[in-house]
Image (cartoon, helix red, strand yellow):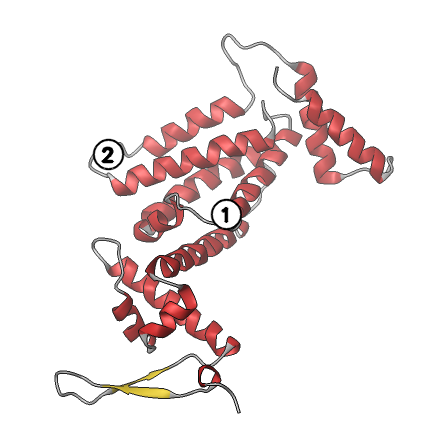
Amino acid sequence: MGTPDQLDHTEDEPDPGGEPSRRRRRATGPADDQGVRAALIEAAERQLIASRDHDIATRAVCEAAGVTQPVLYRLFGDKRGLLDAVADAGLERYSQRKRDLETTDDPIADLHAGWDDHTAFAIENPALYQLMFTPRSRSGPSPLRGILQLLEATLTRCAAAGALRTSPRRAAQLILPANIGIALSLISEPALFDDPDLSRRARDAVFAAVLTGPEPGGTPTPVRDVARQLRSQLGLAGTEALEPAETALLDRWLERIDQPG
């Protein structure tokens, strides 16, 4: 016979207004925990979106999910843990949205579309976006890593076409924070950042710093440019002319040639 935490049961909760008591279901074990956890995350997200101050009340979340508050605290630790789970779920859906974006034969156009889609997502989901992208302390790996890798993949295609003036990694580390900062400014201080063309202007300024083109006062780096392009092409298409160890060594050489300074 299982322990009380493993048994499926409901409990009556008295209603101070004299209405019939509501019956709430408790989590019953690992399998049931997963469903209850998902229900709490969905209820918290709905409340977050509906709230004027972009906050939630754990009691209301539990009522919406049909569980008791001790279940919430057992699964998430506290309110902050629940909000972190809502943010992580949102980031996973956003990552899937990015993966579902159409990939064309023009990586530069895809890069522009990616920035514009990011800003559009923020404007469509202001409360959730702020929760997802506001910096927070965490002990595990950041969910942003997957989003950064998706951006880096597009930039690798740009580099393979000879259109990137720096490495895909360095370019991604510039573009993503800039996109996030602009989006957060637009949704958190719309009266202050009221230029409807702000996102496009910021996008063009950032892209001008990483994409090839005339660079006033710049010093040409043809060897670095060719090394970057070749490394990116090999990363995308590979080669059967070299053994794996030789390919790895060549990749390291090309990476070193592409280092600034």
Q: Position of residue 153 (x, y in %)?
A: 60, 40
The residue under the point 48% across, 78% down is 32
Q: Position of residue 204 (x, y in %)?
A: 43, 27
Residue that mark 2 sits on = 194
Residue located farthest toward the left when viewing the structure as drawn: 17
Residue that mark 1 sits on = 142
Secondary element at tag 1: loop
Q: Is residue 147 left or right of residue 182?
A: right
- Viewer-proximal residue among 138 and 24: 138
- Viewer-proximal residue among 245 and 197: 245
The residue under the point 24% across, 38% down is 189
Secondary element at tag 2: loop
Amino acid type of the residue tagged 1 in the rendering? Ser
Q: Going from the N terminus, do you reach mark 2 or mark 1 first? A: 1
Image quarter where the C terminus lies is: top right
What is the CA distance from the residue labelled 2 to the residue labelled 1?
A: 31 Å
Q: Is residue 28 above or below residue 139?
A: below
Q: Is residue 112 left or right of residue 219?
A: left
